[in-house]
Image (tube, grey):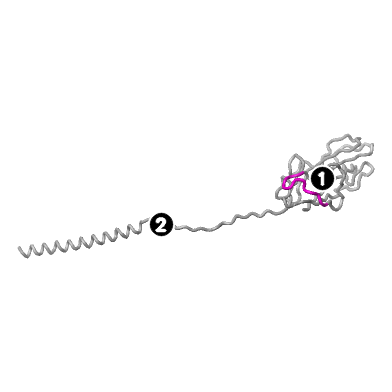
Amino acid sequence: MVTSATSLLSSLAALRGRFLRWGALSAGLLALVSTLWAPVQAATLTGTLLAQLVLTSGCLIVGAPNATSGISLGTLDFGQQSSAFTGSVAAAPTGGASGASTTQVICSTDVAGLSIAVNGGNHAGQGTGIGVGSRAMANGTSYIPYEVYQDAGHTTPYPTSGSLTGFAIPANGSSFALPIYGQVNKTSTAALPSGTYTDTLLVTLTF
């Protein structure tokens, strides 16, 4: 009986040791898992970001912001007259890229002035017996001369070659009317063939 009791006590002691070891191992595992799942403290990075936009110096036709050639500047529409009319008729460019209104130009604020060239068109020098003007509109072989000026008062005509320089921007940073003003001055009392008389002018703005 004494031997049996001793063996039983030894077995209980061994089991107790195992439980203590497992308890320690379980506690260690629990601590490890807790460490792995613990929230990581946030870290930060800082830096700078550059924003940039380059604005070039220049002018453009309102309604055609990305075009530099082949732009529609509209029409010098002198309206409808009798085939036998005499006298003067004036017009300014309308109906181009700027819309139905007068053709508009806008320049960056550092542009102070323009040089403007208007060529002689397709029939320069024709129709001199009909009226006054260095350019002419044609209907077949019939011509009506006309002139184009830098000012609405028709005092400074554009040459058929070369340019007028030093046109001052009238509204810094704001749009303004393209400074081209046409005038038909028919002096002959002779009637002309009815129909549509046309011409095409090449305009160049230098800034």
Could you say which is closer to the camera, residue 119 or residue 105? 105
Residue 100 figure quarter: top right
Identify the residue at image location x=30%, y=59%.
31
Instruction: Kindly state the secondary structure of the residue where label 1 is placed.
Output: loop
Picture coordinates of residue 56 (x, y %)?
A: 70, 54
Distance from disc 1 to disc 2, alpha carbons, whole Å, reads: 72 Å
Could you say which is closer to the camera, residue 115 or residue 76? 115
- The residue to which callout 1 is attached is 180
Tell how many labels. Answer: 2
Indicate whether residue 167 is drawn in magenta: yes
Identify the residue at image location x=51%, y=58%.
46
Discs 1/2, front:
2
Identify the residue at image location x=16%, y=64%.
14
Question: Which amino acid, by three-letter code, is at mark 2?
Answer: Gln
Instruction: Kindly state the secondary structure of the residue where label 2 is placed.
Output: loop
Could you say which is closer to the camera, residue 16 or residue 39? 39
Q: Few, some or many C-alpha atoms within 10 Å of disc 2 (few <14, some 14-19, many ≥20)?
A: few
Q: Few, some or many C-alpha atoms within 10 Å of disc 1 (few <14, some 14-19, many ≥20)?
A: many
Indicate whether residue 69 is drawn in magenta: no
Contact between labelled residues 2 and 1, with CB atoms less than 8 Å apart:
no
Question: Which amino acid, by three-letter code, is at mark 1?
Answer: Ile
In the image, taking residue 110 as reference, residue 157 lies left or right, namely right
Picture coordinates of residue 177 (x, y %)?
A: 77, 43
In the image, taking residue 123 as reference, residue 32 lies left or right, namely left
Query: If the image is split into quadrants, where does the N terminus sit?
Result: bottom left
- The residue to which callout 2 is attached is 41
Picture coordinates of residue 66 (x, y %)?
A: 70, 50
Q: Which residues are magenta?
A: 165-176
